[in-house]
Amino acid sequence: MSNLGAVTDYNQTCVWGETAISMPALPALQDRISTDICIVGGGLTGVRTALGLAEAGVDTVLIEAGDVAWGASGRNGGQANPMWKDTPDCFRERFGTRIGDNLVAATLTGATDLFADIARLGIQCSPIQSGWAQVAHGPKSARFLDGLGSAWRAEGAKIRAMDAAEVALVTGAATYQFGQFHETAGQVQPLSLTRGFATAALAAGVNIFAHTPAIRLERVGAKWLVTTPSGQITAERVILATNAYSQGLHAGLAQTVLPMISILGATRVLTDDEMTQVLPKSVSLADTRRVIYYTRKTPDNRLAFGCIGSSENVRSFGGLSRIKTGIGKVFPILDGIDVPFHWSGRIATSTDFTPHLHEPEPGLTAALGYTGRGIVMTSVMAKTLVARALGADANDLPFPISPIQPMPFHWVKKTALPLIRPILAMQDKWDS
Ligand SMILES: Cc1cc2nc3c(=O)[nH]c(=O)nc-3n(C[C@H](O)[C@H](O)[C@H](O)COP(=O)(O)OP(=O)(O)OC[C@H]3O[C@@H](n4cnc5c(N)ncnc54)[C@H](O)[C@@H]3O)c2cc1C
């Protein structure tokens, strides 16, 4: 496999292809095979789950429609940020105390567990656990962040509040009046991380097939039959790990999330002076805007900067110019900088901003809806999927098993996605 990035749609180039590790070439399925568990989707959820299952001795096959990491996992911002929009008590209220407690515990250790896994497996994905500055774009969001931070701190989260001076010191951004510093958060090269997990899964015995879309899923007796263009897989259990790229494999699943568009750009290589002024401590930054500005430095010393987009074609609907404007707003020293890389991806936004775990039929599981916080949470979810496949009680999981509930008017909302960004941007202006 070449070292090209995962993203080739709209002739866009993703910066992660510049520094990604390669992985063994994968065949497309051309046969009829049987397995214990068939995973559909070769992003972080799929490959991490496959690895966990193989490590537990379960015969596992994974199929991916494109190359491994073609979806969000190979094109995201690489920020390993373990935080939700809700307080621990909200989760306890929503999910019940036992599952709420499990989710709180998994959230507190999630990032550190991921970095420990990366170290254990020796994945060369430029991991740094340097922290995350979560910054407020206005007074209202500062109050919200402060409350959220206090609630999580009370549970043991390593989060501290920062005033404007400390935000500027830590990030080099002088525009934010308040922020929270999350000590356990960090960054990875996401394409390398996904390929690294996939390579470890191969080594552990998983059969991975690329360019092998599942085109039909049906129950045959007590088993599942997954049909691909040139093959078939019979499995005891199927796990759907297709997230924002879910289509019609199982009725209603794709309609449980809104596939919001996120766009990212990466600048030319920064000068030494720019490197010391912009994110001087190599933390990542993400703010509270609804169109969220998120940024970090790349392993090859560029600035990657992203926000919500209106179209997957970053050159249309003013996407690229909004990335450039955002960079200039947050780091005036970089105003007008060349942004040679730009690309887009789909974020599976759930109604309650937390991932969902479904078991719609015996032997069929689906996990999706990370709402832009998937780097850490796909690993938490993968471990959950493995535990469940090995027989864990539903009450011992960090996510409730919920019924598939398509969003009302999903088609209308999906069609109106290009309009959602400007509406969100307007709301951001009003409350900043
Ligand atoms: C631009 C962008 C920036 C982001 N930034 C961050 C960030 O900084 N931090 C963070 O925590 N999260 C971030 N996220 C979210 C994060 O990337 C995702 O939550 C995570 O990668 C989801 O992983 P996944 O494996 O569930 O889905 P994906 O990586 O999307 O994988 C799903 C895969 O399923 C495959 N597929 C679909 N249908 C089929 C089929 N029928 N047969 C076979 N294969 C199929 C697709 O080809 C795809 O590769 C970002 C997302 C985007 C798009």
Image (tube, rainbow, N blue to C red):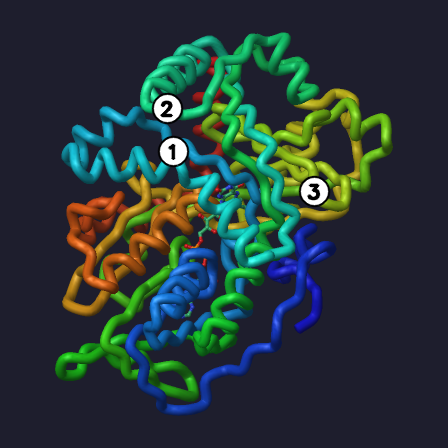
* Closer to us: 304 or 307: 304
Disc 1/disc 2 C-alpha distance (Å): 7 Å
Label 1 CA crowd tier, 10 Å (few <14, some 14–19, many 20+): some
Quarter where residue 59 is shown: bottom left
Q: Is residue 316 visible?
A: no
The one nearer the camera, 131 or 334, is: 131
Badges 1 and 3: C-beta atoms under 8 Å apart?
Answer: no
- Name the residue at 32% across, 40% down: 354
The 10 Å Cα crowd at callout 2, few under 14, some 14 to 19, many 20 or more, is few
37 displayed left or right of 308: left
Instruction: Point out the frontmost of discs 1 and 3.
Output: 1
Give the residue at x 59% y 40%: 187
Of the residues shown, which amino acid type is indicated by label 3?
Answer: Thr
Q: Which mark is residue 156?
A: 2
Residue behind mark 3: 298
Q: Position of residue 296 (x, y in %)?
A: 64, 35
Residue type at the position of mark 2: Gly
Circle nearer the viewer, 3 or 2: 2
